[in-house]
Image (tube, helix red, strand yellow):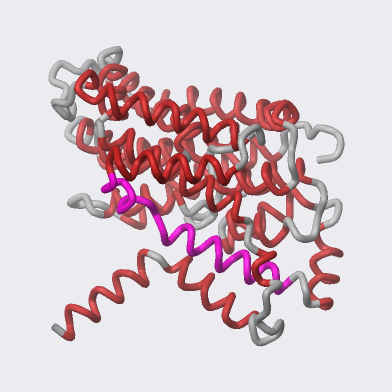
Amino acid sequence: MHSVSKKSIFKFLKQEFVLVIATLLAIISCFFVPVSKAYLDYIDFRVLSLLFCLMLIVAGFRSVGFFYVLSEKLFHFAHTIRSSALVFILLCFFSSMLITNDVALILFVPLSIFSLKHLLTKKQLILLIVFETIAANLGSMFTPIGNPQNLYIFSTYQMNIVSFFKTMFPYTAISFLLLLVSTLLFPKTAITDKMITHTGKDLKKYAFQYLFLSLLFFLTITTVVRITPFEITLTACSFVLFFVNRKLFLQVDYCLLGTFIALFIFVGNMGQISFIQDTINRVVVNNEVLTSILLSQIISNVPATLLLSHFTQNSTALLVGVNLGGLGTLIASMASLISYKFYVKEKESSGFLYFLIFTLFNILFLGVLFFLPKAPGI
């Protein structure tokens, strides 16, 4: 029993090390800034509420098999290994804009491995997963709800939705073209026996749930663009889904929410220490993009966003920097670890080879996107 508990604790620490580190940093920071009611001002409850609602809604769509049915329909257009790889890569790219990069990878990476691993060599399978990961990280940067850092920046700086899309469109468009070119690395071998996961679910049977989920998703979008107060959206999502399918609450990533709370406290406290504030101010101002990219490689782009947002008013540059910062190392975007975990579970997987290929193509994509002509003020 003792060994089982130790294994469980070790497994938790391994899977949620970002939460653990964030919590430790928050606790340490409390020694420099005494705990008080002011801590509540650090926490952005609007962002937390939106994340919670989006995770609930996505879990609902997943529970009725919507995403698997969608992928099955799209897969029928693929008749070669190259076109099949393209389908899954683009699924990750476009779906991440609405359901976030980590959820897109959770949904489609396992499905692509199951469907295509018997048709691909070891290197080709790694390439597929790497490009799916890059696609999810880059596709998600196009919308305010595509990833946590976008939601936070859009909400905190009260960005205009039009300027947000104008800023991110060039990077998203170039990313799309780069992904299309990348699929040329896959052979045009014809597929005669496709192994596709069939859920056996008929969306018509879940029309009632689908209707409610769609309405709640629309309501959440209105909150993102500041039409509906987050309190109303949070209440509506919680109340409706509790009665529609209360099991969905068990699928919410509460560790991610806890990580955000810990980071809010840590970053808030750091902003109260004059020495740290002065140091970061000198480094960040007028260097937001490069600083964001470099810091993301070490602590990942979500913590980097929370930290740097206290030291710059240039939301556009910060937005570009932390999104490009998701490329690079395996921890630059925490969503990248999701794909890696799925891959290493496969027989005869090579973590070292995956790391090399992942790093190579991430650096290539980052290099191209970083040297794009910048808009004034970035």
The answer to whether residue 278 is above or below residue 289 is: below
Q: Residue at x 68, y 79 (%)?
A: 36
Q: 13 or 37, which is in the foreground?
A: 37
Residue range of the region highlighted in magenta in the rendering: 246-270
Q: Which residue is drawn at 17% across and 86% down?
A: 2
Q: Position of residue 357 (x, y in %)?
A: 43, 46
Is residue 35 among the parts visible in the rendering?
yes
Q: Residue at x 17, y 34 (%)?
A: 118
The answer to whether residue 68 is above or below residue 190 is: below
Q: Position of residue 247 (x, y in %)?
A: 26, 48
Residue 191 is left or right of residue 251, and the answer is: left
Is residue 327 among the parts visible in the rendering?
no
Q: Does the magenta stretch include residue 258?
A: yes
Secondary structure mostly seen in the magenta stretch: helix
Residue 155 is left or right of residue 134, and the answer is: right
Which quadrant holds the N terminus? bottom left
Q: 250 or 240, which is in the foreground?
A: 240
Q: 197 or 26, which is in the foreground?
A: 26
Marks counted in the figure total 0
Q: 67 or 252, which is in the foreground?
A: 252
Q: Where is residue 106 in the image (x, y as percent from the top left)?
A: 34, 43
User: Quarter-wise, where is residue 141 in the image?
Assistant: top right
User: Quarter-wise, where is residue 269 in the image?
Assistant: bottom right
Q: Is residue 8 magenta?
A: no
Q: Which residue is drawn at 43% across and 36% down?
A: 131
Which quadrant holds the C terminus? top right
Q: Where is residue 201 in the image (x, y as percent from the top left)?
A: 17, 26
Residue 177 is left or right of residue 226, and the answer is: left
